[in-house]
Image (cartoon, coloured by chain):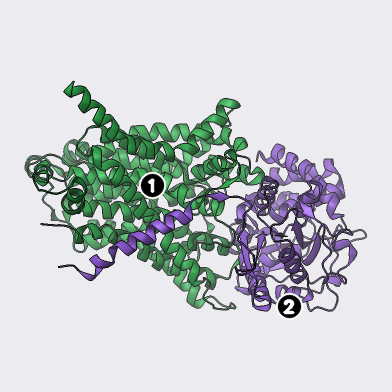
Amino acid sequence: VTVGVATRRELLATLPLAVLFTMAALPLVLLAGFFVAQPSIDVSSLAATLKFAIAGAALSAVVGGGIGATVGTRDLPGWRWAVAASSSLIAAPPAFWWIGLTRLSTGFGRLSGALSGSILAGLMLAPITMLLVLAAAREIPSNAYEAARVSLGPARRFLFVLFPLLRPAVTAGFLLTTILLLGESEIPFLFGFRTSMTDVVTTFSQTFDVGRTVPIILPMVVIVLILGLLMVGPLLTVMLSAASGGRGVIRKRGGLVFGIALLALPLLGILSLSGYAWAATTAEGVRRTIPVGASTVAMSIAEPVACALASVALTVVAAYPIRRSGAIRALVVPGLLLFCVPAAVLAIGWIGVGQFVGGVFVAPAVAHLSRTVGVAALGFLIAYSRVPRSLDDAARLVNMSAVGRAWHLVLPLLVPSLAASAALTAALIFADRDVASLLLEPGASRLMLNLYLLSANAPSSVIGLTALIVFVTGAVVIGLAAAGPFVLWLRRRE
Amino acid sequence: VTSPLRRRSPVIFRVAIAFALLSCGRQEGNAPSSGSNATPSVVVYCSADKEFAEPIFRAYEVKTGVRVLPLYDTEETKTAGLTARLAAEKARPRADVFWSSDTSRAVALVDQGLTATYVPTTAATIPGRYKSTNGTWTGFGARIRVLLYNTDRVSSSDIPRSILDLTQPRWKGRVAVSNPHFGTMSFHAAALFVKWGNDKAGNFLRRLKDNGAVLAAGNSDVKDRVADGRVDVGIMDEDDAVVAVREKKPVGIVLLDQDGPDPLGTPLMPNVALLVQGAPHLEQGQRFIDFLVSSEAETILAASDAAQFPLHPGVAGPKLLPPLDTIRTMDVDYLEVARRLPVMDAAVRDIFGL
């Protein structure tokens, strides 16, 4: 009887997170409903889409993995700065960096076609694999790697020791980058080739009919979900820390070549920003005005920060009751899969949901939250996995309510990971163009969308200035979102 | 000890919760109020480029105190995106006014019953061919289609003179046009179907494709490709071309099909203002259209980077282009072009696989 009660209680405890993810998945349920009602698929662009995504992700895995492995095993001056600068590339979509590069008079603008698009997008997303590999390198058993250093040459050590240990990170990075590139429409538009996502965007724009886009969406989403499922294992292996023992490779001093490799990604970002800065300050024959209003900047900050904090807060509330249960690991999987679905697809799905229930307008925040709760759930899982169980047990001995215990004792321990997931979530929302272009109300505007609208015909100086404002505002957004969870830190009790 | 931030933290949460509640759904069609207590507003769906439209909106706001709430579309879904949205919202319209930069897509809305009739008080001197007689649509601030060429890669003696030249072998792989499903390229293509008939126009598109023409994401993408030398020539609107010239790119502008005994002429595409059927703010919509088609607004559009040709007589035109009355424009009926769009769209799907 006791076991039965405990099981029932545990099942009940999973309900909040399950309900949260079910609500977030509503648009996908609706899209599936459309397919059931009228089963047909359109795979005319799928092969080209897969080629673009896999080529870009492969390059991304090689470059990001190489840099991550270098940073993880070599001591290079300023490596932390280089990693931070490289990571900033994933805080904005590849198209943002590309438009900046084309403002330079270096012939970047001459590049076009799927291969060029793959290379560009792959490089810009390489920090994803870099960060995962770096995280994995910190979990390598120190003694084992030192033994390999003594007994094996560099090539054999890499092939037989380092690569196998980092393989889950490289695999997760490759799969995640493939998933992101499958949902990419801006780079294909800019480089002049067709993918499933460009078909989705153009078909929906021509019809505003959710049902007409389902045949294109469905095969792509199925592939994305399969890749997502394949990614979960390696990703969790990397992100959930190992039990104990000496961890992390002891870094040996690296040579000049390693240092130069480390600078490759930051250099791309700097070149792009230089392109914008050059356009903003030196373009000829154009007027110079501040191209964005204060309200646009304010909303572009408020929305991602509020959504990120709401996403983290909702997830913490829903996941906290099952933090000690194995169920949380299982429940994070659908959350992650939701994150894998392209933002434009979720936005179209939400429009469909709105139309289905009688013309209800769905705010962009809803679409953002439905995609990002999975990231926040993963952040919570990672955070809690790093807290020694004994600390949580000890907290139970303190005489206070369960809510007070969570608020003052347990949650403050999770702050760094929660701050990181809030920052990542805010960056994703700030960088969005798809949801904004489909769901924003008349009169509303967002900086990133403005940049794309202006890039149609505005003078280079206006585009350059707007992009620089976007960049600075993005940094503010990430900073504010990351600062949010520190409220918990201030509430802590020793 | 309670820190100041600690004391203030509940406020942060209250703001977040308020934001979340404000973000929740509400019924479509309930566009922002223009009731007596709120600032009056007008909702404008606008396919004109944001850069060019905003000075008009600001001027109207300053003049009337009415807030303009625009909704733009992206370059790669130009105009078609907003017309599809208007059709989808037919039962519960959110827009009061549609400012379309593509004449044909806007005029096509008339047949779909999406437009209300309103004859603007300021449109009396706009020539009859640029507006409907019953007030379902009114043209203003027109653009023409031009050819932009890269002066580093095309000598002046080699410049194409007719759109048909672009199918010649010497231009193989050197031409860019934007996707004919969207924006003014859709008007251009449909106008060719009207002028030449379906067979000849379809054949032209097929030869263009066989000649390796690049289909770009939009007119500005065509402009960038020509300016960067990725292609040698491209067809676009004159405002895109003027931006490249003003930025001192190595480019030149040519008007196609101007010479010969019976030249085809270049398409002239007025912007179109129309009142949306069932507009939530009917009177505000009418007042805004009065301003939009006025000589005052046309003056702003002509003087700005938009470089558009005023349709009111006596208003100065854009500086970098010849006067409108010296240009041979394509003689087509806008409603006929609008009705030919589905045929053109089908041909483009068949030929380009788009």
Q: Nearer the viewer, residue B59 or B21?
A: B21
Q: Residues within 10 Å of mark 1 (few under 14, many from 20)?
A: many
| A291 relative to B193, above or below | below
- Residue, x 42% and y 69% (percent of image)? A274
Q: Quadrant of the N terminus of chain B?
A: bottom left
| B292 relative to A374, above or below | below
Q: Where does residue A57 sit, x and y in percent of width and height?
A: 39, 43
Determine the CA span between mark 2 and mark 1: 50 Å
Say which amino acid is labelled 2: Lys
Residue B57 lies left or right of residue B108; in this view the side is: left
> Tag 1, which secondary structure?
helix
Q: Which mark is residue B319?
A: 2
Q: Which mark is residue A95?
A: none
Q: Nearer the viewer, residue A183 or A413?
A: A413
> Looking at this rendering, what residue extends furthest in the right direction?
B261
Q: Where does residue A260 sit, x and y in percent of width and height?
A: 27, 60
Q: Quadrant of the C terminus of chain B?
A: top right
- Residue, x 40% and y 48% (percent of image)? A122
- Residue, x 86% and y 71% (percent of image)? B325
Colour of chain A in the rendered structure image: green
Say which amino acid is labelled 1: Thr
Query: Label 2 lies in what chain?
Result: B
| A152 relative to A260, above or below | above
Residue A6 lies left or right of residue A301; in this view the side is: left
Q: Are marks 2 and 1 on the same chain?
A: no
Q: Where does residue A146 sit, x and y in percent of width and height?
A: 8, 44
Foreground tag (2 vs 1): 1
User: In the image, which lettered chain appears purple?
Assistant: B
Query: Label 1 lies in what chain?
Result: A
Residue pointed to by mark 1: A372
